[in-house]
Image (cartoon, rainbow, N blue to C red):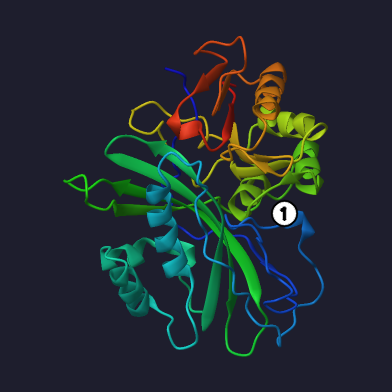
Amino acid sequence: MPRDPRSAAAATSPVGMRRRAVLAGAAGLALGASACGTAPPRNAMGSSPPSPAAALPRPAAWRPDPSDVRPDVKLRAVQLVEALGTWRRGAGGTEKARERVAALGLPPGLAGQAGPLLSGADEAAVQVVDAQYGGILAGSASVLVVCRQWTREGGGPVVTSGTTVDVRLARGATAAARWSVGELHPADPGPPAGSLPEAARRVLADRRIRLPAAAEADIRNGGVHASVLRVLLRLAERYRLDVSVVRSGHPLNVFGTDRPSDHPPGRAFDVWRIDDRAVVDRATPRALIEAFMRDAAAAGSYNVGGPVLPSGGSPGRPFFSDDTHHDHVHVGFDS
């Protein structure tokens, strides 16, 4: 079996990246106009002084793509993250979060594993940018929920942050039973490094490489391998990349195995959208995905997984395909 991505970051401490941005009101910041909760790249967010008068956005609830192999599993994970990370004034705190979790028919104790999704803020709103599999088996699954969050304390400014949560699920005993959530593992990128190599600075500045909060923090932390940075830059010469996961927020092992994943040591990245076309969407040209996979291999990846095998290819290095990777392309490196 290919030594691919599907592993999750078993981390529970807050993502140390919090950024302030002017929010021009809920209507002006309708981030993610698509049905799948797509949000604009982090490079596009404003940097003007925050406005205390701005309202928190009211993002639409995320919905799975009809092309997904198990949309019910993803929806279950996403609804939990949305419930944990969104509250109105007067509804903050762990006890209220437990009530919101219980209303979903899930164990209230999961609120204690929410990490950075819960804070002392008076109000908060979460938008799920993407949900991809960390692994999907007959009776268990890992869903990596990439999200952005807005919070406000008192009459202060709106603060923008985000994280990626590895949500672990198990199937009920009967075919009709709903999937249940057993664990949450929020990303833990660690603090930013004092200095970064030029390639890392270039990735952070490249507007064709769109990074969610946890992935951006991974790069600022300095723990991402040079091969990942180099290939991101090379692929960005030809494609616009929406990255979902780099290092943190991904399972430690390839899901369902005891084999270490390439993600936690910073030797892999996943892409959920190419040239603004979602990998999971059946309307996305297969030729585009195949070309991207071939270019990733040509750039030096030893392990490229996706929803299809490039024409003429066969299972095995460097290409592989399975249900876990029907919604993203994995690009891994062995050194």
Dot 1 surroundings within 10 Å: few (below 14), some, or many (20 or more)?
some
Question: Which quarter of the picture shows residue 153?
Answer: bottom right
Give residue 217's position: percent from left, percent from top: 63, 51
Give residue 59's position: percent from left, percent from top: 59, 69
Task: Tell me if residue 12 can be seen.
Answer: no
Give residue 233's position: percent from left, percent from top: 77, 34
Question: Which quarter of the picture shows residue 81?
Answer: bottom left
Asked whether 289 or 159 is in front, the reply is: 289
Callout 1 secondary element: loop
The residue at which mark 1 appears reads as: 41
Question: Which quarter of the picture shows residue 77?
Answer: bottom left
Lateral position of residue 83 relative to residue 161, left or right: left
Asked whether 44 or 122 is in front, the reply is: 44
Whether 73 is drawn above or below 106: the answer is above
Whether 83 is drawn above or below 36: the answer is below
Lateral position of residue 239 relative to residue 331, left or right: right
Residue at 61 percent of width and 9 percent of height: 312
Query: Which image quadrant: the C terminus?
Result: top right
Give residue 253's position: percent from left, percent from top: 40, 33
Residue at 67 percent of width and 64 percent of height: 31
Residue at 71 percent of width and 23 percent of height: 291
Lateral position of residue 22 relative to residue 245, left or right: right
Task: Tell me if residue 235 can be seen.
Answer: yes
Query: Which image quadrant: the N terminus?
Result: top left
Q: Residue furthest left?
A: 173
Instruction: Residue type at mark 1: give it.
Output: Pro
Asked whether 199 or 327 is in front, the reply is: 327
